Image: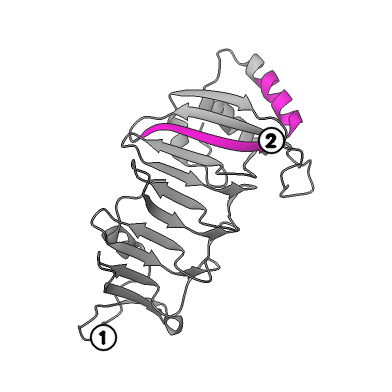
Amino acid sequence: MGRRFSGVLAASILGLTSFSIALAAPSGAPAAAASSQQAPIAHVTVSGKLDDDYTAVTATLAVSPKTLRDEKIWQAQQKAPPSGAAVVGWLIHRGGKLDSQDGPALIYHYTNGATTYRYIHDGQRDRQDGPAIIERSANGTVTREEYYHNDQRDRQSGPAITWRNADGSTYEEYWRNGHERDRQDGPVAIKRNAKGEITFEVFYENGYFKTEYPGLPSATPPVARTLAQFYHQFTPTPHP
């Protein structure tokens, strides 16, 4: 299956080595629909195992009852039982969306004991009362937080991305409505040491990102048009 899952269901889920699907009990209120088509009202919980760095993935999708009925017919027509990944892809292709009303819709469990939670509503990363992506280490420490609204990085009163590294240092990025904030509002990225002291800052100005180090001359030339190089320099390799 060459189709990439819609929304934010990671393509790595296609590597599932085993898979199970369970129909959750109706919650009473239908999930929001993205169009005037029939609203998906059944929530399906999907669990499976992955190779490489993952031990398991759990996903919750909202699908219509008709889609569930058609899926059974489709499976019966196959010459061999389709893989779990093929079934999930089929459900999404027929309008199913990652969606959970009362918790994360996508959970990754890693072989090192870490866990990533993604809050997704109607196929979009979205959470009103906290970060939409949370990663915890094996001992439960929160190591990563990302805030999203309507599938855009957004936080009006603090960093939209926070990484907490094992050495006690932190890395933060400030986003509003899917865009990095301008210099006049403050730095778009901040690196702090274990004492909380700022050791590195990035400002967005006139289409460029400029770096500044406290205690050094601030006349730093433009260095990049994206934040990616700083993100990867000061954070661990991110999980999905």
For image coordinates 35% across by 50% down, the residue present is 238
Task: Tell me: 174 left or right of 34.
Answer: left
**Is residue 237 or residue 171 the one in the foreground?**
171
Q: Residue at 26% of width from left, 82% of height from top? A: 220
> Is residue 4 visible in this depiction of the protein?
no
Residue type beneath disc 2: Val
Residue 93, which numbered label?
Answer: none
**Span of residues in magenta:** 54-74
Q: Report helix, strand or loop for mark 1.
A: loop
Q: Mark 1 points at which residue?
A: 218
Judge whether 132 appears above or below 101 on screen. below
The way the protein has been coloured in the rendering is: one colour
> Count the marks: how many?
2
Dot 2 falls on a residue whose secondary structure is: strand
Residue at screen point 53% across, 57% down: 130
Is residue 202 toward the left or the right of residue 37 in the image?
left
Residue 57 is one of the magenta-drawn residues: yes
